[in-house]
Image (tube, rainbow, N blue to C red):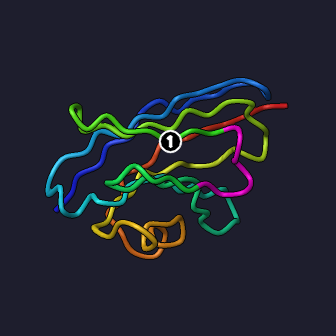
Amino acid sequence: QVQLVESGGGSVQAGGSLRLSCAASGSIYSRNCMGWFRQAPGKEREGVATIDSGGSTTYADSVKGRFTISQDNAKNTLYLQMNSLKPEDTAMYYCAAHGLAGRWCSGPSLVRGAYWGQGTQVTVSS
């Protein structure tokens, strides 16, 4: 079992920044892949960024160069630094985790089957 608790969402203007945090607990073997996905009203879930136990990262094309995923293993915390935010980034953001690293650690894999948190809302106004 894995427990994930997100924080750090909020409302910002376009061009602003936010940092999301995800406090993780439970089996470390089920957290070899961690990341974020988001879902906007009326849209499908979209994998945003992942990081695996080896430190390898992936990003959705829509956020490359603007978002940075990182983790503090000592604090069991995952982060998503979001810069140059756009209105189209508005969504509920979820922290997710599963046990497979390497090429099995991807945005779609987190959306399909993983432990999820409750989500934190990000709203970007123009």
Going by the image, does 124 lie left or right of 54? Answer: right
Looking at the picture, tell me which residue is in the foreground, 41 or 106. Answer: 106
Q: Give the x, y percent position of residue 105.
A: 43, 67
Looking at the picture, tell me which residue is in the foreground, 34 or 89. Answer: 34
Q: Is residue 95 above or below residue 101?
A: above
Q: Amino acid at mark 1?
A: Ile
Quadrant in which residue 34 is drawn: bottom left
Q: Which residue corresponds to mark 1? A: 69
Q: Quadrant of the C terminus?
A: top right
Looking at the picture, tell me which residue is in the foreground, 63 or 53. Answer: 53
Q: Give the x, y percent position of residue 69.
A: 50, 42
Q: Give the x, y percent position of residue 124.
A: 72, 34
Going by the image, does 117 lie left or right of 39? Answer: left
Is residue 108 inside the magenta stretch? no
Q: Give the x, y percent position of residue 72.
A: 31, 34
| Magenta region | 59-66
Q: Quadrant of the N terminus?
A: bottom left
The residue located at (53%, 71%) in the rendering is 108
